Image (cartoon, rainbow, N blue to C red):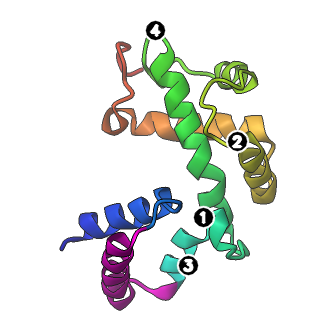
Amino acid sequence: MNAEDILAELGDIYANRHQWNRKRRERGQRYMGWVCTYIPEEIIQDILSHADHLNLPRETLVRKAISACDEITGLITAVALVRPSRSLYDLEPSSVKKKWKDKAFAAGTSRTEMEHAAKEFGIELWEHVGNVIQAMRRIAPELGLEGNIPKP
């Protein structure tokens, strides 16, 4: 069991919160035991706090940032992937805003949750989207979002 397996399992636990079964719960508890041994409790709580269904308070800037960036990075990725360039390098907040208005696009994401998270983080939503796009551009190759545009 390595750190990547543990983090993947934590993400899996979060992503599949509605599909728990006994085997998955037992495996999750085993991983959480390992995680709790090696990772400070504060960091574990920071990570878990972004899951709304756990109702953990987001009292620190780190927790607010994680919450504000989680869903919006997925939406930004989806918008980038449907563009002809398939790239973050030419993506602007206005393109995300256009897709945002199309309720059929990324219908599984909660726009209300994203708005609330940005507000809780203390930033206007579309300014936040611009900041997140800029941050994601720095790691576009690792995200597979260079598309067919050369890095500027």
Amino acid type indicated by mark 4? Pro
Q: Is residue 78 left or right of residue 114?
A: left
The disc placed on residue 128 is 2
Decide: few, some or many residues near mark 1? Use Cα within 10 Å; few <14, some 14-19, many ≥20.
some
Task: For residue 89, say whether it is visible.
Answer: no
Amino acid type indicated by mark 3? Gln
Mark 1 or mark 2: whose residue is earlier in sequence: 1
Question: Is residue 5 within the magenta segment?
Answer: no
- Where is residue 58, by image quadrant? bottom right
Between the C-alphas of marks 2 and 3, the distance is 24 Å
Q: Which residues are magenta?
A: 21-41
**Which of the two marks, 2 or 3, is nearer to us in this view?**
3
Which residue carries the number 1 mark?
51
The disc placed on residue 45 is 3
Q: Do tag 1 and tag 2 residues touch (Cβ < 8 Å)?
A: no
Amino acid type indicated by mark 1? Ala
